[in-house]
Image (cartoon, grey):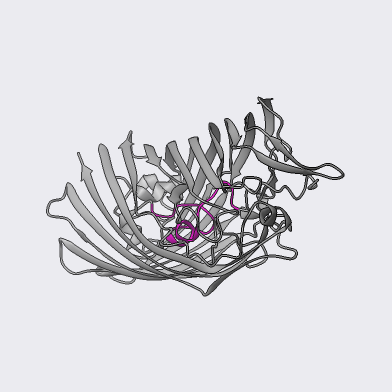
């Protein structure tokens, strides 16, 4: 029988993640960076410092001190239009050969799903020192769906992840130089993953699905050593999402040594699993050169290396499951993001901005899977703001992402490889375009 470590029914290293497009469209791994149309236009340079937008509270709650008098509300929307194709070869293993699988080069088709990511913010200045804020975001998610019977179907079919994060926060202006902020995170996560079942002669689908909640905090500070220069340091904690759900396989044949192939029925098991989304530290700086020009930069670290292996536990099994519940292998490295940008006040109503960024993915070829063939990527961005009145402003941002050449090699010592299933080797061709828009209003 297959060992517990090398289950024939595999959920690959990205079992709670997405495919190339998801990683390429946002922060490395399966995080979503698109939380601000304003900062989208600068490749998120300076996003942990104060500015004309309160959306910076997502990265640093202390920046709420930049809000005006009374109530400020903002609505941001990002439309992600990715293209991602995976072309490669699947060579069947011992079990998939017995069940009729043959060598396949069937392409994935465009696995990417266009997506709309909303983000909303509100801030109320209580007095000269205290500002309350609220952010509602989708910090992790998106979905992918290759062709049903593509070559890599035994390692992944569809993947869906959805999150909602509610973030109340408060900021306090200590003096002219320092401000601090703290907040809470209340997060909901929903996951649904499918792949072809190696035990089935018809390559039927196995499914993992679950949903649950988690809690965390945010914190930050800003420092202005001079009137024209500001530094910001923000922190978003890890969130442990406790998922309840089910694992379903369609039934098939199981090889027993000395006996041969034994037929067994389908299985539906209730499961519990804890998936921890990582903490992030963001450091930004901004400097106003003159009344028209402001320059900014950002360095961000994400603790993806805390994601090792997730072991779901069963809460009930209707029939015999010869493979047990699959372990979810991650074993990511830490992620890093670097960007520089600037903005130019064209006139009293229009501000232009641009930026460039580079992201170091937490995933390399040693662990890269068909669910998340993530890689390093270059960000090229531009944007503008139009403020027709002192109360109302609109933002537009655009980014084009260029991933590095990406290969998948699930064989040998790869953490997902199982000789009973087979090998998959392929190349990923992808690019991503992101358009963001926002409305900001001060009452």
Q: Quadrant of residue 215?
A: top right
Q: Is residue 183 above or below residue 398?
A: above
**Residue 28 seen:** yes
Residue 294 in sight in this render: no
In which image quadrant can residue 324 be found? top right
Main secondary structure along the magenta-highlighted residues: loop
* Left or right: residue 355 compared with residue 265: left
Q: Quadrant of residue 437?
A: bottom left
Q: Position of residue 230 (x, y in %)?
A: 42, 60
How many marks the image carries: the answer is: 0
Residue at horizontal 19 percent and vertical 52 percent from the top: 393
Outermost residue to the bottom: 405
Q: Nearer the viewer, residue 339 or 28?
A: 28
| Viewer-proximal residue among 149 and 368 | 149
Q: Is residue 428 left or right of residue 269?
A: left
Residue 19 counted in the magenta span: yes
Q: Quadrant of the N terminus?
A: top right
Q: Is residue 66 magenta?
A: no
Would residue 290 appear left or right of 156 to someone viewing this image? left
Q: Establish if 89 lies above or below 142.
A: below
Q: In the rendered structure, which segment of residues is drawn in magenta?
A: 14-34
How far from the left and from the top, in percent, is residue 350? Answer: 18, 63
Residue 96 horizontal/vertical position (percent): 66, 54
């Amino acid at each position: 029988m297959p060992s517990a470590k090398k289950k024939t029914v595999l959920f690959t290293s990205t079992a709670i993640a997405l495919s190339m497009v998801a990683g390429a469209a946002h922060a490395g791994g399966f995080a979503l960076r698109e939380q601000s149309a304003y900062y989208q236009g600068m490749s998120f340079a300076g996003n942990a410092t104060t500015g004309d937008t309160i959306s910076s509270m997502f990265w640093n709650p202390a920046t709420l001190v930049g809000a005006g008098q009374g109530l400020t509300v903002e609505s941001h929307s990002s439309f992600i239009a990715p293209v991602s194709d995976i072309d490669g070869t699947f060579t069947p293993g011992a079990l998939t050969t017995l069940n009729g699988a043959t060598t396949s080069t069937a392409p994935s088709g465009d696995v990417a799903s266009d997506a709309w990511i909303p983000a909303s913010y509100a801030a109320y200045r209580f007095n000269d020192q205290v500002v309350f804020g609220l952010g509602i975001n989708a910090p992790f998610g998106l979905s992918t769906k290759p062709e049903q019977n593509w070559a890599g179907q035994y390692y992944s079919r569809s993947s869906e992840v959805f999150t909602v994060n509610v973030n109340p926060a408060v900021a306090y202006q200590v003096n002219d130089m320092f401000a601090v902020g703290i907040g809470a995170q209340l997060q909901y996560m929903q996951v649904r993953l499918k792949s072809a079942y190696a035990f089935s002669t018809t390559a039927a689908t196995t499914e993992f699905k679950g949903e649950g909640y988690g809690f965390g905090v945010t914190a930050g500070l800003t420092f202005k050593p001079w009137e024209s220069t500001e530094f910001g340091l923000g922190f978003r904690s890890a969130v442990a999402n406790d998922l309840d759900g089910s694992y379903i396989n369609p039934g098939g044949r199981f090889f027993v040594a000395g006996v041969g192939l034994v037929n067994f029925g389908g299985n539906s098991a209730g499961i519990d699993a804890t998936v921890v989304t990582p903490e992030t530290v963001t450091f930004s700086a901004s400097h106003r050169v003159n009344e028209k020009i402001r320059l900014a930069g950002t360095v961000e670290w994400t603790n993806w290396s805390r994601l090792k292996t997730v072991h779901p536990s069963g809460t009930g099994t209707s029939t015999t499951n010869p493979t047990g519940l699959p372990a979810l292998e991650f074993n990511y490295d830490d992620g890093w993001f670097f960007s520089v940008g600037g903005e130019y006040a064209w006139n009293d109503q229009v501000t232009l901005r641009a930026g460039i960024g580079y992201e170091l993915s937490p995933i390399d070829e040693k662990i890269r899977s068909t669910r998340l063939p993530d890689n390093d990527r270059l960000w090229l961005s531009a944007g503008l703001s139009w403020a027709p009145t002192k109360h109302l402003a609109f933002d537009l941002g655009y980014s084009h992402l260029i991933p590095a050449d990406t290969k998948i090699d699930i064989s040998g010592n790869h953490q997902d490889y199982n000789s009973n299933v087979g090998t998959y080797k392929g190349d990923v061709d992808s690019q991503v375009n992101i358009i963001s828009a926002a409305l900001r209003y001060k009452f």
